[in-house]
Amino acid sequence: MIIFIGADHRGFALKQTVIPFLRRQGHEVIDAGTRVEGIDCDYPQISRDVAAQVAKHAGSRGILLCMTGIGHSIAANKVPGAYAALVYNNKTAALSRRHNNANILVLGAKFIDEGAVEEIIAVWLATEFEGGRHARRFEQIKNIEKEFLR
């Protein structure tokens, strides 16, 4: 699977551990930045770049990392076709896929147990969208998106 990944300066160190993990799992990883440690950067452009690529490439996924995950979630969800979910554990990771069809995983580096990150990502990548009543709701979300496209 193609996975687009991005982080601001607060998520950079975690990104550097996540990329090798994903590659060991056989995924193609495309790094959208930041690529320089220790230099402040603004997250919205990174969020946009990852979200745009995920929306463009069917079947791909995205991972965004920052201090809280909140800013990346807000920014990524502005891109039509991007469905970013801020998760904190295996359960929320699985539910974001099973019930919400999230195609972008967002993690807050300061508030996540670093020892659990690989398992959270593995659960998220392995979980399929359940469909059923959730498909109806997902369609409603897409209709809201279409309504506000300019």
Image (spheres, helix red, strand yellow):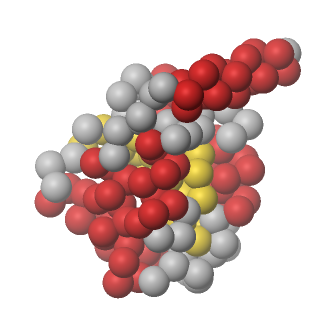
Of the 4 image quadrants, the one containing the N terminus is top left
Query: From where the camera sits, is residue 37 visible?
Result: no
Furthest-front residue in this view: 133
| Residue at point 60%, 59% (across, down) | 86
Of the 4 image quadrants, the one containing the C terminus is top right
Q: Position of residue 59 (x, y in %)?
A: 36, 28
Q: Residue 51 appears in which quarter of the rendering?
A: top right
| Residue at point 70%, 22% (across, down) | 140
| Residue at point 41%, 25% (across, down) | 57
Q: Position of residue 137 (x, y in %)?
A: 64, 28
Q: Position of residue 131 (x, y in %)?
A: 46, 28
| Residue at point 49%, 51% (across, down) | 95
Horizontal relation, residue 51 to residue 150: left or right: left
Q: How many marks?
A: 0
| Image vertical order of residue 31 relative to residue 117, above or below | above
Between residues 102 and 75, which one lies in front from this camera angle? 102
Between residues 147 and 56, which one lies in front from this camera angle? 147
Query: From where the camera sits, is residue 108 visible?
Result: yes
| Image vertical order of residue 80 relative to residue 46, above or below | above
Horizontal relation, residue 105 to residue 17: left or right: right
Q: Position of residue 147 (x, y in %)?
A: 82, 16
Between residues 51 and 112, which one lies in front from this camera angle? 112
